């Protein structure tokens, strides 16, 4: 079945007309995929999908993204960055599946406006694609995602009636109107480091950016894998957040906005 696929001229020139035509015909394109930008599921049979070609020094990897997240394009990265990107996208190393654990969980990040105390607040919702183990423990030892965040200063949320407290030292990096990273304090008082970083900056809506610039802050909600899911509308996202909070599976914080 033909896919709702976008293949840019640059990508077509790199992979060749024959391969591009096979992709558009659906021969080499997965119906479902995890977006290389926002890390949430997509379906090239149901929604516009971009082909994104990552090119390293020795390796080239074709990935897929929601067209609303990224346009079809070529992304030139170092070989080391490409290997890391492949591990994040697939849970496998490009040079062999034995180099890393299959199914490695990655963080999916969704932006949206959430009504709290009568005002629309810019929010990011973080949900891993699978259970998160505590560093140094076996991957089947249980999901430690929320306990790890609570240890970092995130607060459990039982309702969205009020604003969560500010998490000092953390910030959300927005540059040129796009979301780049969530930063956490560096070790031993060093420079902030990325807790989460987009492979390519994520687009946010004008309304989201305006709200963030107005309040100079962003709310970050986090929940275990499978608790929220990818919601197509902000009202459905709010409903999912409310249900997750009521189950005691939501933590949150407020972070200063870095950039514009």
Image: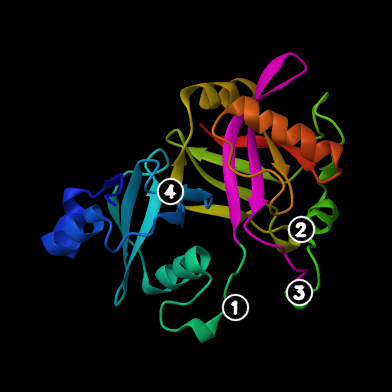
Kindly identify which residue carries mark 4: 43
Could you tell whether 67 is left or right of 21 in the image?
Answer: right
Name the residue rendered at 52%, 86% in the picture: 98
Which of the two discs, 4 and 3, labels the residue nearer the N terminus?
4
Residue 119 magenta:
yes
Residue 231 location, quadrant: top right
Residue 236 screen position, x and y as percent: 64, 29
Residue 51 screen position, x and y as percent: 31, 53
Kindly identify which residue carries mark 1: 101
Mark carried by residue 145: 2
Q: Cα distance, mark 3 to mark 1?
A: 12 Å
The answer to whether the residues at label 3 and label 2 have Cβ atoms under 8 Å apart is no
Q: Nearer the viewer, residue 164 or 101?
A: 101
Bounds of the magenta segment? 106-135
In the depicted structure, whether residue 183 falls above or below residue 95: above
Name the residue rendered at 87%, 43% in the picture: 248
Q: Cα distance, mark 1 to mark 2?
A: 18 Å
Q: Cα distance, mark 3 to mark 2?
A: 13 Å
Kindly identify which residue carries mark 3: 140
Main structural element of the magenta stretch: helix, strand or loop?
Answer: strand
Which of the two discs, 4 and 1, labels the residue nearer the N terminus?
4
Residue 165 screen position, x and y as percent: 82, 34
Residue 128 screen position, x and y as percent: 65, 55
Q: Cα distance, mark 4 to mark 1?
A: 25 Å
Mark 1: give few (<14), some (14-19) or many (20+) Cα within 10 Å: few
Which of the two discs, 1 and 2, labels the residue nearer the N terminus?
1
Residue 86 magenta:
no
């Amino acid at each position: 079945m033909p896919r709702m696929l976008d293949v840019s001229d640059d990508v077509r020139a790199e992979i060749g007309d024959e391969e591009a035509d096979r992709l558009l015909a659906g021969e080499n394109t997965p119906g479902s995929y995890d977006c290389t930008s926002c890390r949430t599921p997509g379906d090239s049979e149901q929604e516009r999908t971009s082909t994104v070609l990552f090119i390293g020094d020795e390796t080239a990897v074709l990935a897929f993204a929601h067209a609303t997240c990224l346009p079809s394009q070529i992304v030139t990265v170092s070989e080391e960055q490409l290997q890391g990107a492949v591990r994040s996208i697939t849970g496998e190393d490009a040079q062999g599946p034995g180099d890393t654990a299959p199914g490695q969980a990655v963080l999916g990040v969704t932006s949206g406006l959430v009504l709290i105390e009568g005002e629309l607040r810019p929010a990011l919702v973080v949900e891993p694609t699978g259970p998160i183990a505590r560093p140094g423990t076996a991957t089947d030892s249980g999901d430690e995602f929320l306990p790890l965040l609570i240890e970092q200063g995130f607060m459990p949320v039982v309702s969205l009636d009020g604003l969560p407290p500010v998490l000092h030292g953390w910030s959300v990096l927005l540059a040129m109107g796009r979301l780049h990273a969530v930063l956490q304090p560096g070790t031993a008082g060093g420079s902030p480091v990325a807790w989460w970083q987009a492979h390519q900056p994520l687009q946010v809506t004008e309304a989201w950016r305006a709200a963030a610039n107005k309040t100079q802050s962003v709310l970050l909600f986090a929940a275990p894998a499978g608790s929220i899911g990818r919601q197509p509308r902000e009202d459905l996202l709010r409903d999912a957040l409310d249900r997750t909070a009521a189950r005691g599976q939501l933590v949150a914080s407020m972070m200063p906005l870095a950039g514009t």
